[in-house]
Image (spheres, helix red, strand yellow):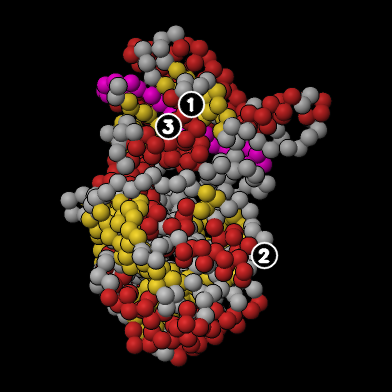
């Protein structure tokens, strides 16, 4: 009853792995399989970070209990399989919420730590890993507690599951005055305006949406959202919808995306607007549509996400020009400012601007993304390993300066390499140059 | 009125989903099962989620000494006492074919063990004139099939027991819900080939809670299994005996 064979994918569905998967429902069942395979969460990373086509994986989603909540100190201790959405739903009415939320509430705490995810408030609070006080990591048959600040901890946070299986974590929470978010939306007419406004904003939560079909002077146009938590009751959320089957190829073709983007842009009046939205609606907008990844059809999609240093913001403009002329743009393009906060050695964030773009998985997408990867490398930027499918091993070494130190700790934690994933093998992350 | 639930087999994922819903309502919960470490984590989760009480007690369907303490503990709670049975074991039929001694264990886990506990609790419910018992059976108990007829026989026995208990408790103001799940996405079915229409445990828990509120007698969950099992039951035996479904 332990292993099930079959194929599975990450959120992008473009890469597929075949192999046995275990899904322990109790700690004792986890102990029986630990050490044989890497742990995975809800598979919300896009490509092969959660795949192991040469071996097996351990799905942690059934170990999802809240062990302790201290409403005075604002801390919570949870099993790694708890989703951030579940945690937010439970805690927000009691005045607390996870201090960092990525774009989906389906991500597990274990996955959020292993990828050291960030949110729309990275500039002010840093990454998810920086909110973690301690971790319990299962390695070599032993549960070990790692506390914030230690080298082992910094290797586990953002550590792609390579230092052991994260079974529990204690998180510092952020106060949450109510269940509402006041969101101010404004149209941005150009890339330069977008960057200038991101730079000028003092709101705790800031995110830019970009119409990537625009070219020329309009390159980089879009909508900037600035938000703060408020003690206001939001209007009730609309009923969640679902994409019941794989959409046909044409659903996200060039003309459709152009039309959608134009309409999306116009829904915000020229003067801008301010609305009260629910926490879920603001932080997890796409979770309202279950299985939205099916919109890209059965071939799936890739996401490219990079960060470039502040001084190199123009590189993103070049990328947007290039994407705009590629004819491959999707409606999902996000621009954010990042601070310098990062919780681990292999964490993605660095001070600068981050751009995330979805591409339907067609032959041409690989070339486009490889070109974007190179443009990122050329300006001293970094590509996000939770999204990547096309980096080259030598590019990683220059993008992640602490890689060698991390690889040494990973080698000590997992000498047999039993925790390696498809991503780790593809990018030779466990090899120390 | 204050509600307290005894959960037999509290480590099962269906039980865990049900416990979360009870916790959300603020009910008291006694978690009973063998893996006390695991149940301790579930009990803490239940408390954070709002349970008035969440305590762990050892219960082993094959160890009758563990039965009476459960009833004693429940009797100390005021208000309405309820119970939900999620225990059962389903070893592969081939294991039982090789070692028929295992049959007794399956019957004990899935039928006689929990029935013994319910029998002890029934007297308390009659005295208080209220309380609901949820017995989780299985669609496998509706007709014997070559693939799992020992488990099916145990569940069929349990169904019949629950039917009689319902007859008894109804007179005293109590109620019994028989739950027949189809395929549920749990550790029990994780590696079983040919599973279809697999329901998440949360769906089953929702259905059970609704059945308790509406005082349903027998439910299939998800509901379409009632239709499937009606058809399966209607197949004449001369034909059924040649099928492998």
Please indicate whether residue A91 sits to the left or right of residue A428 in the image. Answer: left
Tell me the SS state at disc 1: helix
Query: How packed is label 2: few (under 14 Cα within 10 Å), some, or many (20 or more)?
Result: few
Tell me the SS state at disc 3: strand
- What is the tally of numbered marks visible in this picture? 3
Does the segment drawn in magenta span residue B87?
yes
In terms of depth relative to the viewer, which is nearer, A296 or A24? A296
The residue that mark 1 highlights is B211
* Residue at (50, 83) in percent of width and height: A216
Chain-order first, disc 1 or disc 3 = 3
Report the magenta residues as a range: B74-96
The quadrant in which residue B26 appears is top left
The residue that mark 3 highlights is B8
Please indicate whether residue B133 sits to the left or right of residue B71 in the image. Answer: right
- x and y, in percent, of residue A356 in the image: 46, 73
- x and y, in percent, of residue B93 in the image: 65, 39
Please indicate whether residue B235 sits to the left or right of residue B148 in the image. Answer: right
Evaluate if marks 3 and 2 touch, with contact meaning CB atoms under 8 Å apart: no
Q: Are marks 2 and 1 on the same chain?
A: no
- x and y, in percent, of residue A252 in the image: 61, 65
Question: Separation of disc 1 and disc 3 at Cα?
Answer: 18 Å
- Kindly report which numbered mark, 3 or 2, lies closer to the viewer in this rendering: 2
* Residue at (44, 74) in percent of width and height: A221
Q: Chain of mark 3?
A: B
Evaluate if marks 1 and 3 touch, with contact meaning CB atoms under 8 Å apart: no
* Residue at (60, 65) in percent of width and height: A256
In terms of depth relative to the viewer, which is nearer, B108 or A232? A232
Q: Residue furthest left?
A: A72
Q: Residue furthest front?
A: A270
* Residue at (60, 25) in percent of width and height: B156
Q: Which mark is residue A249?
A: 2
Quadrant containing the C terminus of chain B is top right
């Amino acid at each position: 009853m332990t292993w099930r064979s079959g194929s599975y994918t990450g959120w992008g569905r473009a890469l597929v792995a075949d192999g046995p998967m275990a899904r322990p429902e109790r700690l004792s069942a986890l102990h029986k399989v630990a050490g044989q395979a890497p742990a995975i969460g809800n598979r919300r990373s896009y490509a092969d970070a959660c795949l192991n086509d040469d071996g097996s994986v351990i799905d942690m989603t059934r170990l999802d209990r809240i062990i302790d909540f201290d409403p005075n100190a604002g801390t919570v201790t949870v099993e790694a399989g708890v989703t951030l959405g579940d945690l937010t739903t439970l805690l927000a009415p009691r005045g607390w919420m996870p201090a960092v939320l990525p774009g989906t509430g389906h991500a597990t705490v274990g996955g959020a730590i292993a990828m050291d995810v960030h949110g729309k408030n990275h500039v002010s609070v840093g990454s998810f890993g920086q909110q973690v006080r301690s971790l319990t990591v299962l390695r070599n048959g032993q549960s070990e507690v790692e506390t914030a600040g230690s080298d082992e901890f910094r290797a586990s946070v953002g550590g792609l599951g390579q230092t052991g299986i994260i079974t529990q974590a204690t998180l510092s929470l952020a106060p949450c005055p109510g269940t509402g978010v006041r969101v101010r939306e404004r149209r941005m007419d150009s890339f330069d305006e977008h960057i200038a406004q991101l730079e000028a904003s003092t709101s705790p939560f800031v995110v830019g949406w970009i119409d990537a079909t625009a070219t020329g002077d309009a390159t980089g146009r879009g909508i900037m959202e600035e938000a703060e938590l408020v003690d206001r009751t939001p209007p009730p959320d609309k009923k969640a919808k679902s994409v019941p089957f794989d959409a046909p190829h044409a659903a996200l073709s060039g003309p459709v995306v152009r039309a959608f983007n134009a309409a999306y842009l116009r829904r915000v009046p020229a003067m801008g607007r301010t609305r009260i939205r629910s926490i879920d609606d603001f932080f997890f907008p796409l979770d309202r549509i279950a299985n939205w990844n099916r919109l890209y059809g059965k071939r799936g999609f890739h996401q490219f996400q990079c960060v470039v240093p502040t001084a190199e913001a123009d590189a993103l403009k070049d990328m947007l020009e290039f994407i705009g002329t590629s004819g491959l743009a999707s409606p999902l393009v996000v621009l954010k400012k990042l601070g310098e906060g990062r919780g681990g050695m292999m964490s993605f964030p660095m001070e600068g601007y981050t751009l995330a773009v979805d591409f339907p998985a067609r032959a041409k997408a690989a070339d486009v993304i490889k070109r974007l990867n190179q443009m990122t490398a050329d300006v001293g930027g970094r590509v996000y390993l939770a999204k990547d499918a096309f980096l080259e091993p030598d590019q990683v070494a220059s993008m992640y300066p602490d890689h060698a130190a991390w690889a040494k700790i990973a080698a000590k934690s997992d000498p047999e390499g039993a925790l390696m994933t498809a991503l780790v093998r593809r990018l030779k992350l466990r090899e120390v140059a | 009125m204050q509600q307290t639930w005894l959960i037999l087999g509290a480590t099962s994922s269906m039980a865990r989903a049900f416990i979360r819903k009870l916790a959300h309502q603020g009910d008291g919960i006694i978690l009973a099962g063998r893996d006390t470490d695991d149940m301790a984590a579930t009990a803490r989760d239940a408390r954070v989620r709002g349970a008035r009480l969440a305590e762990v007690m050892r219960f082993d369907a094959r160890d009758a000494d563990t039965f009476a303490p459960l009833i004693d503990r429940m009797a100390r709670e005021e208000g309405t006492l309820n119970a939900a049975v999620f225990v059962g074991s389903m070893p592969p039929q081939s294991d039982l074919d090789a070692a028929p001694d295992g049959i007794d264990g399956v019957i004990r886990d899935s039928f006689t063990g929990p029935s013994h506990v319910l029998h002890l609790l029934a007297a308390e419910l009659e005295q208080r004139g209220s309380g609901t018992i949820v017995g989780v059976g299985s669609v496998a108990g509706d007709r014997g099939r070559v693939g799992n007829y020992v488990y099916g026989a145990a569940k069929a026995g349990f169904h019949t027991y629950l039917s009689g208990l319902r007859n008894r408790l109804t007179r005293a103001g109590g109620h019994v819900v028989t739950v027949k799940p189809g395929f549920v996405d749990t550790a029990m079915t994780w590696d079983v080939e040919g599973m279809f229409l697999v329901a998440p445990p949360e769906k089953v828990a929702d259905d059970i809670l609704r059945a308790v509120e509406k005082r349903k007698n027998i439910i299939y969950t998800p509901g379409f299994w009632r239709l499937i099992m009606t058809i399966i039951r209607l197949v004449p035996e001369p034909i059924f005996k040649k099928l492998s479904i």
